[in-house]
Image (cartoon, rainbow, N blue to C red):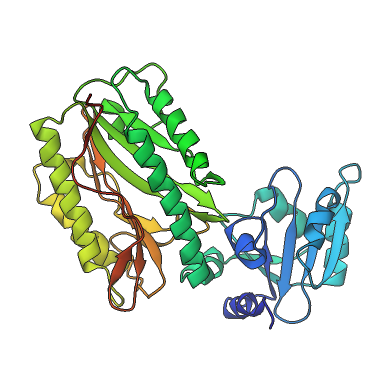
Amino acid sequence: MDRYSALRRTARDVGADAVALVPGPNFERLYNTSFHSLERPLVVIVPVENAPAAVVPNLEMRSFDALGFEGKVFDWRDQDGYASAFAALAKQTPLGTLAVEGQVMRVFVHHALKTAYPGLQIVDAEREISALRRVKSPQEIATLECAIRASEQALAEVLEQVRTGQTEAEVESLLTQALFRNGAQEHAFGPIVAAGDNSAKPHAHARTDYALRDGDTLLFDFGARVDGLNADITRTVFVGHATDEARSVYEVVLAANLKGHEITRPGVTAHDVDDACTAVLEASPWSDWIRTKTGHGLGRAVHEAPQIMRGNHEILEPGMVFTIEPGLYGDGAFGIRIEDDVLVTETGCRSLTTFPKELTVVGQC
C-alpha cells in the first residue's frame, strides 16, 4: 500500500506537482515520529507520481533511515550548508508547482526551495493537507484517551494539595510533576494555572508573586502529550469558598458546556455548536464577558481543524475530535472556563474527558 496516496491526491486536487512536508503534525502522522525544527531544514517532497525525495541534515540520517523512506535522500552538513542539497533535489525531482503547509513551513525553507527551483510556484495547501487529520483512527482515539487519563489523574492529585498561600507557579509545578508521574511524555502546551483576576486572561501565565487567597477562582488549562497526541482540558475550581457571583457565572458556563454536548452529532456544523453554546452565554447577565469561540479541533496539534466558531459551516463527521470550552472572563475580576475533549460518534458524541464538572471548592482543611 502506498502511504503517500492521500498526499498525492491532495497535490492533484490543488493543481500542484507535489506536496512538501516539514517536521510537524502532518509529518508525525505519516511517519509516526518527530524531528527537531531548529536552524536545520528537513523537507520531504511527495510528487503526484514517482518516489518521494528528501533534504535531511546529516546528523539526522540515522534517525531518518529508521523511517524506511522510499526515495532519494540528499543530506547536508553544517559546515557545507544546505544549498547544494536543495539544488540536487531540484535536479532529481523537477517541479513547477509545490503545495506546502502554510502554517508550518518556515520562511527560510521557502526561500531555499525558491532558490533551488527558479520560477517555482508555491501554493498554501495547509487546509487541504491538514484535512487528512480531521477524522481520527481508532488507534489515535485510544492514544488521545491515554493522554486525557494521565491529565485527569494529575489534576485530581493536585487539587488535593492546593492551599491558600501557594503561588500560581508553585501549583503549576505540582501539576507538571503529577503529569509526568501519571504517564505524560511531554506537555501538550505550556500549562495555564491562573487565580483571581489572572483567571480572566484566557492565556494567562502563572505568577510567582501572587499567593492564592480564600475565595479565589483557580483555573487549570493543560494537557499531557502521549505518542504524539495531545489532551487539552480546562477546569475551574474555587479556593476556600465561592462567592455568589462566581457560583452564578459558573452555572452559566457549565450550561453552555452541556449545551455543546447536547447539540454535537454528525451532520451539524461547527457553526451550530458554537452558536448554541454562545447563545447560552449571551443570554446571561455576563454577555460582555465573552472573549473566545467555543472550541477547536484536537489531535496531533493542540489547535487544528475544525474550528468550533460561528461562520464555520464545516459539517461534523464521526471520528472528529474537538474541544467544547465556553468561558466568561471579567477583566479585573475573574474568569471561568470548562473544557472537554469530545469525539463525534455515529449517533452523537462521547466526551473523552470524564473529570467532574460540578462546582468544586478546594483548599479546605
Residue at figure coordinates x 16%, y 28% from the top left: 241
The C terminus: image quadrant: top left
Horizontal and vertical percent for residue 37?
68, 47
Residue 320's place in the image compared with 110, above or below, is below
Q: How many numbered circles does the render carry?
A: 0
**Residue closer to the observer: 162 or 211:** 162
Horizontal and vertical percent for residue 100?
63, 63
The N terminus: image quadrant: bottom right
Is residue 117 among the parts visible in the rendering?
no
Residue projecting furthest to the front: 365
Horizontal and vertical percent for residue 322?
38, 60
**Residue closer to the observer: 174 or 248:** 174
Is residue 64 among the parts visible in the rendering?
yes
Residue 320's place in the image compared with 108, above or below, is below
* Image-based side of 261 in relation to 114, left or right: left
**Residue closer to the observer: 110 or 174:** 174
